[in-house]
C-alpha cells in the first residue's frame, strides 16, 4: 500500500479536491483506493453525501478502545463512494473534540498507521485529507504516510501557510528520526492574474527542489463534480483540471518508483 497525506496548515488551498481527483484517477487505472477524512469539518465526507453530523460510526471511533486494531470494526466504519474500488473512512464533527479527550494518552499519534496496517492487503493506495491545524490528527497523517503532498494556492497569503507546513514537517521528521519526501503543488492557478504569476515565481525561488513543475488551474468543473458527488474524472475526464492532476499523478508515481529503486540498490 502507498500512503500519501495531502496537507497544508491553511484552509481553502485544494486539499479535498486533490484527494478526490487523485483518488478518481487511481481508480481509473484499476487501483483499490481508500480515502481518509481527518478533518473535523468533514468536507471529504460531505463530498460523497455522508453527513458528518449524523454518522453512527466514523474515524473518530478508531481512537478509542484499540478499535484501530480490530479489522471487523474498521470494515464497519468504511463507506463506499460513487466509484467501485474507492472507499471512504469518514469523519464526524466529533473529531473536533478529540484533542481534548486523548491529550496525554500514549500512542494517539499512531492510530491511523495502526489502522492502515490492518488494511494493508485490501488497498493499493490510501489518500489522507487533513485538517489545517497542527494537532493529533495532522500528526497521525504525517506519522502514517510515505509521501506528503502540499497543495498551495497561488496567492501571496498562502505562502505563510506553506512556510508553517514545511516547518511542521521538519519538526515531525526530526522527532521521528526519518525523512518524509514532500511535493508542493501550486493550486488555483490563474495565469491571467499577476498575483498567481508572482506567487508561483516566488515558490520556485523558495522551494526549487520540492515544487512540482506544473500547476493546478482554476477549473469550474471541480465545483460541478462536487455538486453531484462525482469524481472530477467521472464528470469530465478531459477537463483542464483533470488533465493537470493526471500529470501530477504521473510525476508522483515516477518519484515513488525512483525511491523504490534507490531502496533496492541499498
Image (spheres, grey):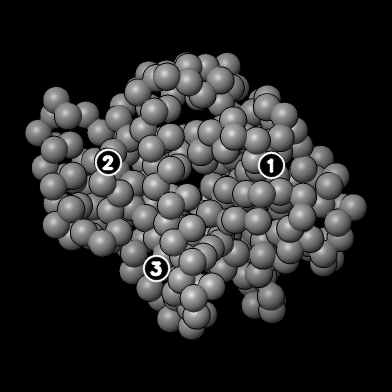
Label 3 or label 1, whichever comes before in sequence order:
1
The residue that appears at 28% across and 38% down in the rendered structure is 215
Compared to residue 151, the image places residue 229 above or below, namely above
The residue that appears at 53% across and 33% down in the rendered structure is 25
The residue that appears at 40% across and 60% down in the rendered structure is 182
Answer left or right for 166 relative to 84. left
Disc 1: which residue? 32
Disc 2: which residue? 214
Q: Residues within 10 Å of mark 3 (few under 14, many from 20)?
A: some
Q: CA distance from mark 3 to mark 1?
A: 30 Å
Q: Position of residue 245 (x, y in %)?
A: 41, 35
Is residue 6 visible in the rendered structure shown here? yes
Q: Position of residue 16 (x, y in %)?
A: 49, 39
Answer left or right for 127 relative to 177. right
Number of numbered discs on residues:
3
Q: Position of residue 19 (x, y in %)?
A: 52, 41
Amino acid at each position: 500500500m502507498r500512503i500519501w497525506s495531502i496537507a497544508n496548515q491553511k484552509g481553502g488551498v485544494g486539499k479535498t479536491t486533490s484527494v478526490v481527483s487523485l483518488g478518481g484517477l487511481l481508480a481509473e487505472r484499476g487501483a483499490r483506493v481508500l480515502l481518509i477524512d481527518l478533518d473535523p469539518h468533514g468536507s471529504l465526507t460531505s463530498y460523497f453525501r455522508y453527513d458528518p453530523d449524523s454518522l453512527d460510526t466514523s474515524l473518530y471511533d478508531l481512537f478509542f478502545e484499540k478499535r484501530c486494531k480490530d479489522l471487523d470494526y474498521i470494515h464497519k466504519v468504511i463507506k463506499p463512494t460513487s466509484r467501485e474500488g474507492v472507499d471512504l473512512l469518514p469523519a464526524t464533527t466529533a473529531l473536533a473534540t478529540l484533542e481534548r479527550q486523548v491529550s496525554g494518552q500514549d500512542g494517539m499519534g499512531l492510530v491511523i498507521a495502526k489502522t492502515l496496517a490492518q488494511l494493508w492487503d485490501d488497498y493499493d493506495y490510501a489518500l489522507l485529507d487533513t485538517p489545517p491545524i497542527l494537532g493529533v490528527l495532522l500528526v497521525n497523517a504525517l506519522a502514517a504516510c510515505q509521501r506528503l503532498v502540499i497543495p498551495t494556492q497561488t496567492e501571496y497569503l498562502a505562502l505563510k501557510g506553506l512556510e508553517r507546513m514545511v516547518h511542521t514537517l521538519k519538526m515531525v521528521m526530526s522527532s521521528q528520526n526519518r525523512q518524509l519526501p514532500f511535493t508542493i503543488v501550486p493550486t488555483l492557478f490563474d495565469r491571467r492574474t499577476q498575483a498567481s504569476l508572482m506567487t508561483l515565481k516566488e515558490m520556485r525561488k523558495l522551494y526549487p527542489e520540492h515544487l512540482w513543475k506544473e500547476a493546478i488551474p482554476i477549473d469550474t468543473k471541480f465545483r460541478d463534480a462536487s455538486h453531484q458527488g462525482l469524481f472530477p474524472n467521472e464528470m469530465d475526464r478531459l477537463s483542464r483540471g483533470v488533465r493537470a492532476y493526471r500529470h501530477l499523478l504521473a510525476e508522483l508515481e515516477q518519484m515513488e518508483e525512483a525511491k523504490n529503486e534507490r531502496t533496492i540498490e541499498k
